[in-house]
Image: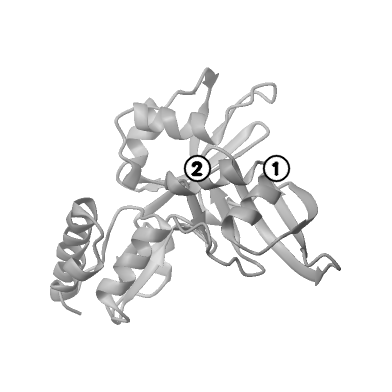
């Protein structure tokens, strides 16, 4: 564990600022042996923080539920256990109800939260279903949101805080695609899964809009392994569920599940 590693890990000035902020907060908590946490981090930011601190005792990532994508880095002192994260810990789960005839999107919720002056690091994962949405926020910002967050887009909301035990991960609708590809390159898989041209796939990759298992990737020739989850900003998410046989023409059969 060495602060000098920030320069080795950071790819740009924004990374350096973020990592320095994380270092100062977490290392201070370690020295005082008190519970401290960062804001919500993206998968890439979590990976950088993991490289920075290594396998130090007491560190863990937490986003409100086991499969969370956006998570905080938390230092738990030796007198605390995991229950401290769920009992008045750093994360709150909020539920927003609205009329079933309304159809606000994930983007509507995130945009409305950001428009309220709330920073991205204060907001974790967001799930929108028919008539209901759940989202995770830092506990200190929850009272403000409960009092002031009234609309997502044009949709009026009724908010309340719920215990973590009442949150259930929504079952995502899947659209199955069976196709053949010339190779398992990233651009080929994106083209098949989102039904776009290879050229369009290359543009999304070059623009930095593509992530593999939550981590950004700008290499079009990156080989995609079976089970990998791909996301493209503006298009959605999908998983390369199965890599099958090779056809007589040398193409590879694939099964892709795209999240609707």
Residue in front for this viewpoint, 5 or 68: 5
Q: Is residue 8 above or below residue 114?
A: below
Residue in front for this viewpoint, 106 or 227: 227
User: Residue 219, position in %: x, y?
Assistant: 47, 59
Residue 169 makes an appearance in the image:
no
Q: Is residue 122 above or below residue 79?
A: above
Residue in front for this viewpoint, 7 or 184: 184
Neighbours of disc 2 within 10 Å: few (<14), some (14-19), many (20+): some
Q: Is residue 205 above or below residue 20?
A: above
User: Residue 122, position in %: x, y?
Assistant: 34, 45
Residue at 79% in and 69% down: 244
Name the residue furthest front.
249
Residue with the mark numbered 2: 203
Residue at 13% in and 75% down: 31
**Element class at badge 2:** helix
Neighbours of disc 1 within 10 Å: few (<14), some (14-19), many (20+): few
Q: Quadrant of the C terminus?
A: top right
**Left or right of residue 235, residue 88 in this image:** left
Q: Earlier in the sequence, mark 2 or mark 1?
A: 1
CA distance separating discs 2 and 1: 14 Å
Residue with the mark numbered 1: 195
**Left or right of residue 178, residue 76 in this image:** left
């Amino acid at each position: 564990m060495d602060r000098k590693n920030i320069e080795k890990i950071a790819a740009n000035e924004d990374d350096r600022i973020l990592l320095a902020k994380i270092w100062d907060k977490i290392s201070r908590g370690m020295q005082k042996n008190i519970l401290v946490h960062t804001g919500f981090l993206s998968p890439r930011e979590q990976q950088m923080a993991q490289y920075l601190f290594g396998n130090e005792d007491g560190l863990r990532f937490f986003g409100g539920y086991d499969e969370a994508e956006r998570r905080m880095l938390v230092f738990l002192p030796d007198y605390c256990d995991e229950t401290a994260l769920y009992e008045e810990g750093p994360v709150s789960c909020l539920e927003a109800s609205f009329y079933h005839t309304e159809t606000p999107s994930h983007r509507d919720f995130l945009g409305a939260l950001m428009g309220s002056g709330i920073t991205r690091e204060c907001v974790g994962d967001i799930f929108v279903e028919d008539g209901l949405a759940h989202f995770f926020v830092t506990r200190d910002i929850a009272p403000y949101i409960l009092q002031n967050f009234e609309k997502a887009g044009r949709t009026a909301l009724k908010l309340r805080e719920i215990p973590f035990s009442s949150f259930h991960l929504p079952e995502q609708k899947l659209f199955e695609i069976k196709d053949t590809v010339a190779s398992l390159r990233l651009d080929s898989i994106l083209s098949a899964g989102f039904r776009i041209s290879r050229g369009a796939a290359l543009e999304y990759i070059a623009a930095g809009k593509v992530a593999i298992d939550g981590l950004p990737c700008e290499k079009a020739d990156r080989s995609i392994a079976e089970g990998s989850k791909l996301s493209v900003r503006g298009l959605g998410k999908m998983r390369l569920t199965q890599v099958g046989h090779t056809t007589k023409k040398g193409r590879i059969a694939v099964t892709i599940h795209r999240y609707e």
